[in-house]
Amino acid sequence: MLVEPQEIERARAGDDAAFSRVVAAYRKRVLGTIARLIGQPDDVEDVGQEVFVRVYYSLGRLRTAEVFEPWLYRMTVNAAYDYLRKRRRRAERRMSDLSEQQMVSADATEGMVRDGEERRRTGIREKLNELLSAVSEDDRILLLLKEVEGLSLRELEAVYHVNENALKVRLFRARQRVLRGFAAAQRVTGPAGGRKAAVGAEDGE
Amino acid sequence: MNDAERELDELFRAYRQSFGDVDASGGFTPGLWEKIEARRSLAYRVTHVARAFLGASAVVFTLLFGVFLFVENRSSLDPHESYLDSLASAHASDSMIESMHSEVGEAAHR
């Protein structure tokens, strides 16, 4: 744990200074997780603040300080999930409001703004986000927690309160679906293109 | 593990690296406390309005109930009315009670 359990107990008892110290300790980890779950760096701080507001008002319901970390992960996952749902609704509304011509010019403007390193990073995020669109938002988050955040099955079990076998099945199915999409994309661009995209992403192509 | 699986794992790793080191700006913590305070004051206002509404509802209900009881008692209390008169007026259409009333009246005259 990044803080002593006593610090969490103090925050739970209403000590705002202790709560600030807990925020300072976990802020970076929470923001990193949110960034990777929602794939949208601009909105990370907003979602992060929402997580800690929920933590502040729900700390009283925490059973013991020892389970704080999986509980915080669950709060983070829920806030990211809410954000993704809102974003999908907003996008659907926006798309239905725009004409095709407006959408083309919006894409072109966005393309001009990006360049160099940021463009490469955005490319990787878009590629994975596109592949992950083949699975539900629940499975997207579960897959990212396992494959990107590196949580073990045991840690996921504590976050989701679901037994390990059920998680294994969900993860396997989600990964297979993403893998099928990935293989299909490889067939279109060719294996070299696919490898180039993934490896080039790391090399700073 | 086949090539596609390995490449997918590489893409997951590249995705993680693409975010770099994420940390908050200087406005994160003050912004967080503003949101906490805003939610606290909203919760306070909602609780306050709900309590006021409940209190007002209780007063209005008590008043209406009091008025109802008063009107009920007043209409049913007539000091010059006998029990049978009251019964007859409460069941004006009940012919049996009317006939009983007249029979009792006649017997009293006799």
Image: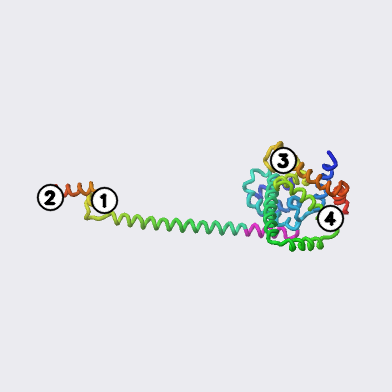
Q: Pointer 1: residues within 10 angstroms few (<14), some, or many (20+)? A: few
Name the subunit of mark 3: A
- Name the main secondary structure of what is drawn in magenta: helix
Determine whether, in the image, residue A150 is placed left or right of residue A71: right
Q: Position of residue B50 (x, y in %)?
A: 52, 57
Q: Secondary structure at mark 2?
A: helix
Disc on the earlier residue, 4 or 3: 4
| Quadrant in which the N terminus of chain A is drawn | top right
Labels 3 and 2 in the same subunit: no
Q: Position of residue A106 (x, y in %)?
A: 76, 62
**Nearest-to-viewer mark from 2 and 1:** 1
Name the subunit of mark 4: A
Q: Position of residue A199 (x, y in %)?
A: 87, 49
Q: Nearer the viewer, residue B45 or A103?
A: A103
Which residue is found at the position 63% from the left and 52% from the top? Answer: A57
Q: Pointer 4: residues within 10 angstroms few (<14), some, or many (20+)? A: many
Labels 4 and 2 in the same subunit: no
* Mark 4 and mark 1: Cα distance apart in space: 93 Å
Disc 2 marks a residue whose amino acid type is His
Residue A68 occupies quadrant: top right
Q: Which residues are magenta?
A: B25-38
Location of mark 1 (residue): B93
| Quadrant in which the C terminus of chain A is drawn | bottom right
Q: Secondary structure at mark 4?
A: helix
Disc 3 marks a residue whose amino acid type is Arg
Q: Position of residue A114 (x, y in %)?
A: 82, 60
Which residue is found at the position 25% from the left and 55% from the top? Answer: B78
* Mark 4 and mark 3: Cα distance apart in space: 31 Å
